[in-house]
Image: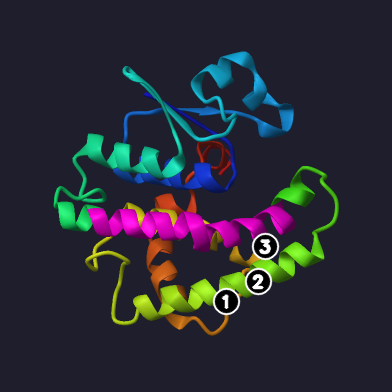
């Protein structure tokens, strides 16, 4: 298997999950700044022109949440449980995350991390203000859910944690307003105890 990535938000969760699971993947970096995601060969794998992509013997799988579920399934890991009730609960949180939490966290990540990284100009103040307001709303939802829980679903580490937490390693850079959300901080500190969560990218490890 090959996992195509760059050192950006959604590939981070796929790389972290692959590392954590010990998945037998070859990591292939796609340099977005060089336009490598727009080549005919890459678009043949993912017509959306985005990373990550997981290439397997049966074809290419894109969308980061689908990839982390598939990697867990291949590994026989309880990150994607066999129990259908827990699967549905995980899907619920993956949907919530994509529509709300990581959507708005990703907007702050784009404005404060991606714009300067790729020379895209100053942050859009209106977009930042809107994203901060939305993040407060959904941080409150997550914080309340995590009261008395170590993890999001069934009090057990799952792909839901890898998905929902993906913007938080960049909280300081992205100016995600975590102050006042003690349960979210506690939960993310627990994720940060996993070496593969803190250091998911192969190039970063090689440089270290």
Q: CA distance from mark 3 to mark 1?
A: 17 Å
Decide which of tag 2 and tag 3 comes sooner along the chain: 2
Q: What SS does tag 2 mark?
A: helix
Q: What SS does tag 1 mark?
A: helix
Compare residues 14 and 132 and report the one nearer the observer. Answer: 132
**Label drawn at residue 173:** 3
Residue 157 magenta-highlighted: no
Q: Report which residue position mark 1 lands on.
A: 136
What segment is highlighted magenta in the picture?
A: 88-113
Residue 110 magenta-highlighted: yes
**Farthest-out residue, right:** 121
Using residue 59 as the reference point, say whether residue 36 is left or right of it.
right
> Quadrant location of the N terminus?
top left
Residue 21 location, x and y as percent?
30, 42
Q: Is residue 63 above or below residue 165?
A: above
Crowding near the residue tagged with mark 3, few <14, some 14–19, many ≥20 C-alpha atoms within 10 Å: few
**Residue under the point 85% across and 56% down:** 122
Q: Is residue 155 above or below residue 59?
A: below
**Residue under the point 58% across and 36% down:** 6
Q: CA distance from mark 2 to mark 3?
A: 14 Å
Residue 51 location, x and y as percent?
54, 34
Answer whether labels 1 and 2 touch (C-beta < 8 Å). Answer: yes
Q: Report which residue position mark 2 lands on.
A: 132
Decide which of tag 3 and tag 1 comes sooner along the chain: 1
Report whether residue 158 is seen.
no
Q: Within the image, what quadrant is residue 41 found in?
A: top right
């Amino acid at each position: 298997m090959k996992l195509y990535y760059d050192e950006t938000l959604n590939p981070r969760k796929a790389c972290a999950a692959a590392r954590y699971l010990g998945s037998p993947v070859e990591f292939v970096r796609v340099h977005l700044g060089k336009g490598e995601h727009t080549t005919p060969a890459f678009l043949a794998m993912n017509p959306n022109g985005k990373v990550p992509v997981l290439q397997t013997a049966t074809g290419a799988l894109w969308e980061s949440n689908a990839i982390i579920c598939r990697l867990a399934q291949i590994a026989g890991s309880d990150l994607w449980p066999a129990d259908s009730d827990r699967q549905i609960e995980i899907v619920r949180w993956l949907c919530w995350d994509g529509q709300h939490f990581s959507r708005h966290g990703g907007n702050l990540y784009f404005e404060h991390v991606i714009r300067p990284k790729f020379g895209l100009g100053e942050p859009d103040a209106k977009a930042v203000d809107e994203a901060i307001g939305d993040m407060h709303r959904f941080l409150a939802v997550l914080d309340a859910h995590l009261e008395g829980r170590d993890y999001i679903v069934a009090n057990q580490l799952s792909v839901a944690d890898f998905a929902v937490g993906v913007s938080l390693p960049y909280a300081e850079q992205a100016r995600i307003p975590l102050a006042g959300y003690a349960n979210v901080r506690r939960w993310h500190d627990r994720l940060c105890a996993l070496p593969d969560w803190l250091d998911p990218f192969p190039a970063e490890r090689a440089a270290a």
